[in-house]
Amino acid sequence: MAKNLLSVVVLISGSGTNLQALIDACPASNYQITAVISNDPKALGLERAKKSGIETLTIEQESFSSRAGFDSFLASTISRFNPSLIVLAGFMRVLGHTFVKQFHGRIINIHPSLLPTYPGLNTHQRVIKDKQKVHGVTVHYVTEALDGGPIIAQEEVPILSDDTAEALAARVLKKEHVIYPKVVNLIALGKIQMKNGEVIFDKSIL
Ligand code: GRF
């Protein structure tokens, strides 16, 4: 019997290794990626998507005089694909309130830290500088609060005494590539959703 696949649009800005992990997991999952949108025409992730026959689009912020203009064009472009889920995979742009409201409960993000600690950029450097022992990755729903939406899943990564930001980032990324496709598939299976600002997990996965 044909699977009922969740339609997903992925937003990227860079190398797209998380996108690649999502693409690779597709055949054994219940979602399909209908489009990949980048705000940078040079993003390597665009090539990854094209190689897999996924439609790609670039929307450059420089073409818009305001943040709201960019967000509104992005929203209408995404709506053409009518996705059930928008997956931010290294999308280096903060989405405005109107955008987030429009797709409420249908946007997720992956962040390289154990949120709520270390929101924002350069998390690997910051945890090492602060002499932390544990770092990690968080997948969360996107709300108006920057890196502050309800947490879906987290995975810890120990920080080694002689760690560099690059080595640590590589180990975190490895975890990202496992956790993100897993979460997207669980959402596709209807086992995870956001209701009244809270993440609801199906009993079968608790
Ligand atoms: C990842 O570390 C992700 O957590 C963060 O941006 C990075 C994207 O990497 N949001 P890639 O483009 O998927 O390789």
Image (spheres, grey):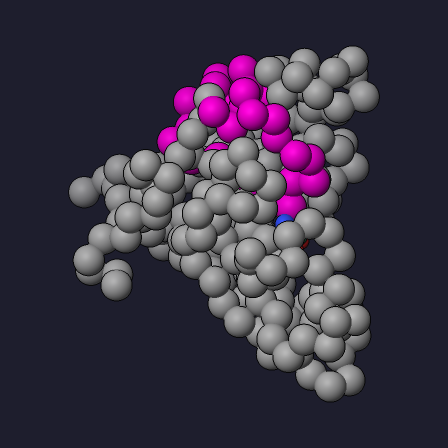
Identified at 66% across, 34% down, the residue is 94
Residue at 55% from the left image edge and 56% from the top image edge: 116
Residue 26 drawn at (x, y percent): 42, 49
In percent of the image, x 26 and y 37: which residue is there?
4
Q: Is residue 182 above or below residue 108?
A: below
Q: Does the magenta-highlighted stretch encompass residue 116? A: no
Q: Quadrant of residue 136?
A: bottom right
Q: How many marks do you count on the picture? A: 0
**Lateral position of residue 118 relative to residue 142, left or right:** right
Quadrant, the C terminus: bottom left
As drawn, the residue found furthest toward the bottom would be: 161
**Image location (x, y in percent) of residue 184:** 41, 48
Q: Is residue 3 visible?
A: yes
Q: Quadrant of the N terminus?
A: top left
Relative to 103, is 176 above or below? below
Quarter where residue 84 is shown: top left
User: Is any atom of residue 47 visible in this view?
Assistant: no
Q: Which residues are magenta?
A: 74-101
**Res 126 quadrant in image:** bottom right
* Left/right of residue 163 with respect to residue 72 in the rendered view: right
Question: Whole-percent x and y of residue 13?
Answer: 70, 40
* Location of residue 37 in the rendering, given as x and y in whole percent from the top left corner: 61, 31
Question: Residue at the location (48% across, 17% down)?
Answer: 80
Using the image as rendered, state which of residue 5 and residue 146 is in the foreground: 146
Asked if residue 112 lies left or right of residue 102, the reply is: right
